[in-house]
Image (tube, rainbow, N blue to C red):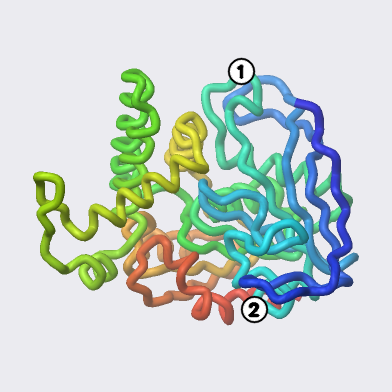
Amino acid sequence: MPPEPVTVISFPEATAVAAPRCASDLTEQRGTRRVSFTPKYGSDAVDVDVRYLWCGAPNAPTVIVQGGISADRDVCAGRERNAGWWHELVCEGAAIDLAQYRVLCIDWLLPTDLGDVPSVSSEDQAAAIAALVDELGIGRAHAFVGSSYGAMTGLAFAAHHGDKLKSLVLLAGAHRPHPLSTAQRSVQRGIVRLGLESGRTDEALALARQLAMTTYRGSEEFSRRFAAGPELREGRFHFPVEDYLEHAGRRFVERFDAQRFLALSESIDLHDVSPESVGVPATLVGFPSDRLVPLADLCELQRRLGNTATLEVVESPYGHDAFLKETAQIAPVLRRALNDCR
């Protein structure tokens, strides 16, 4: 794939839109850089095209921000998009203030990007970001803020490229996956593989996403939202939660494909970083209702990290998805963490 041209944008004056916009003196690069590194499950170095966004105040410290497996590089609003997947926390005046920082975010790599390798690892994602940091002349990032799979990648970055980083902020992600969470994702991958084999890929991917939603969200939220009784429709009883899950499945199929899902889901379960190898200060954020990343795993991570680590516990009914839903509670935690590493 030929490298995507780098687009350097000076934002126009902000206009009234649904999501925050960047001010006129902020700039954006959205493009592709070719970098080289050796994949964890490969034997030779490969050239990889990394699709990235680098946005914020010119010459300001860079904060790397990465989300879950369904997130892309568009973390914030921009000239051609009214929102990003974390725009409430990444914009001018927000917790990750684009008037004070530049934010760097990439699209996740897949095994096909790396040549003949059986899987892509969180270490590979970290290596790509580290190489991109060099390519862009950043030198040392102010912080790596990672959520879910992004937190796993952040740990891998700190463990293997700690000289390029001042501090680490991890939300809903640990040094290894919990075995029960791996079991749940394994069933999801089995559903998708069965769909590929039977020619019913979209149905299978939607069903896998529906199952995933039952692990992302908390029991309290489901109890509150879907307590009503079933309705008799089209010859069978439909439960209130089914409409929600089916809608989530359809939306996921519209923007994701089966092979990407299989690769990134497997990458989560291959993740394994020794906490003792992390030498930068860290702020951990956990949610007691999160069944995918139990709070006990973050307590263990905090004890074992090789530098100062604090654990912030945020109460939420939203389970693993609290890092997306509880922006008001998370904002002061991010501000403190970024200010502490100045």
Which of these two is toward me, 51 or 180? 51
- On the question of residue 274 being in view, the answer is no
Circle 2: element type: helix
Q: Please tell me which residue is depicted at 78% across the width and 55% down the height of the picture.
A: 54
Is residue 144 depicted above or below 124 in this figure?
below
Tell me the distance, in whole angstroms, between the alpha carbons under discs 2 and 1: 42 Å
Q: Please tell me which residue is depicted at 49% across the width and 59% down the height of the picture.
A: 304
| Residue beneath disc 2 | 335
| Residue beneath disc 1 | 116
- Neighbourhood count class around disc 2 (C-alpha, 10 Å): few under 14, some 14–19, many 20 upward: some
- Res 201 → quadrant: top left
Q: Please tell me which residue is depicted at 72% across the width and 71% down the height of the picture.
A: 21
What percent of the width, then of the height, locates residue 114? 65, 26
Q: Amino acid at mark 1?
A: Asp
Q: Please tell me which residue is depicted at 42% across the width and 62% down the height of the picture.
A: 321
* Image quarter of the N terminus: top right
Name the N-terminal-most of marks 2 and 1. Answer: 1
Circle 1: element type: loop
Q: Is residue 221 left or right of residue 48?
A: left
Q: Is residue 152 left or right of residue 105?
A: left
What percent of the width, then of the height, locates residue 239? 16, 56
* Image quarter of the C terminus: bottom right
- Res 209 → quadrant: top left
What percent of the width, then of the height, locates residue 189? 36, 33
- On the question of residue 240 being in view, the answer is yes
